[in-house]
Amino acid sequence: MEIKASCRLDLESMRALVHLRAYRGKSPKKRLTASLIMLPLLYALIIFEMIAFGINTLLVVLLVVTVALTFLTVYNHFLMPKASYKRLGVMQGSINSYTFRDEDIVVSTVSSEYNGEAIVSYSVIVSAFETSRYFFLTQTNSTCFVVDKSTVLGGTAEQLRQKLQSAVPKYVLCKY
C-alpha cells in the first residue's frame, strides 16, 4: 500500500523543525514560557544578592551569564528559524512530495530552480519525530524530510505512523 504526502518548505515548517531540534522534542511553548519565567526570577535573585551583600565578582559573572542565556533563548526561538529558512536559498518554498511504499520512500522535489526525484530506503532514516502537524524523518544532523500530516493521501496519518514505527529504529511521538 502506498501513502502519499507532501510539504512546502516555508517559514512555518522550518520553525517547527528548528524548535524540534532546539527543544529536543519537548513542547516549544512550554519550554519558552518556563525560560521566560525562570530567567527573570534569577535576575531578581542576583540583584537582591548584590543589594544585600554588595557587588561581588561572582554575582556580576552570574548576571552576565543570565543575560547571555536570555539572548540565546530569544535567538533560538524567534530568530534561528528565520535564519535557517534564509539558508535554504533556492530551496525556499520548494515542495517535497513523498510516496511511502513498503520498502522505500520516493521523494520528489520541485522548486523554481530544481526538480529532482530520489528513492530513499527506510534503512537510512535514523530517526522519526511526530508532532501534531508534521512528521520529521532524519537521515543525518543536517538532512531531514518534513512531511505535513494534513496532506496525507491514500491512507491516514495513523497508518503512516505505524509504517514509520515499524521501519525506523528511533520513533518519537511529541506531545505538542
Image: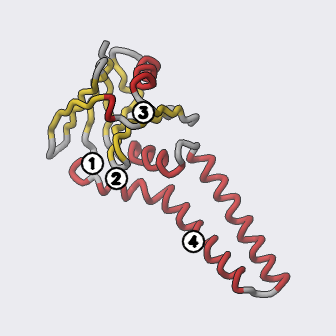
In this rendering, the label closer to the viewer, 1 or 4: 4
- Mark sitting earlier along the chain (3/2): 2
Q: Which residue is the site of mark 1?
A: 92
Instruction: Give the image location of residue 21, x and y in percent.
Output: 47, 48
Amino acid type at circle 3 is Phe
In this rendering, the label closer to the viewer, 3 or 2: 3
Residue 66 is at least partly visible in this image: yes
Q: Nearer the viewer, residue 135 or 93?
A: 135
Instruction: Give the image location of residue 99, x and y in percent.
Output: 27, 24
At a point 32% along the width and 42% down the height, the residue shown is 9
Please state, as top left, top right, bottom left or bottom right, where the N terminus lies in the image: top left
Disc 3 and disc 2: Cα gap in Å? 18 Å
- Mark sitting earlier along the chain (1/4): 4
Please state, as top left, top right, bottom left or bottom right, where the C terminus lies in the image: top right
Instruction: Give the image location of residue 97, x and y in percent.
Output: 26, 30
Check disc 1: other Cα within 10 Å, few if <14, some if 14-19, many if 20+. Answer: some
Disc 3 and disc 1: Cα gap in Å? 19 Å
Location of residue 58 with respect to 41 vertically, above or below: below
Q: Which residue is the site of mark 2?
A: 85
- Mark sitting earlier along the chain (3/1): 1
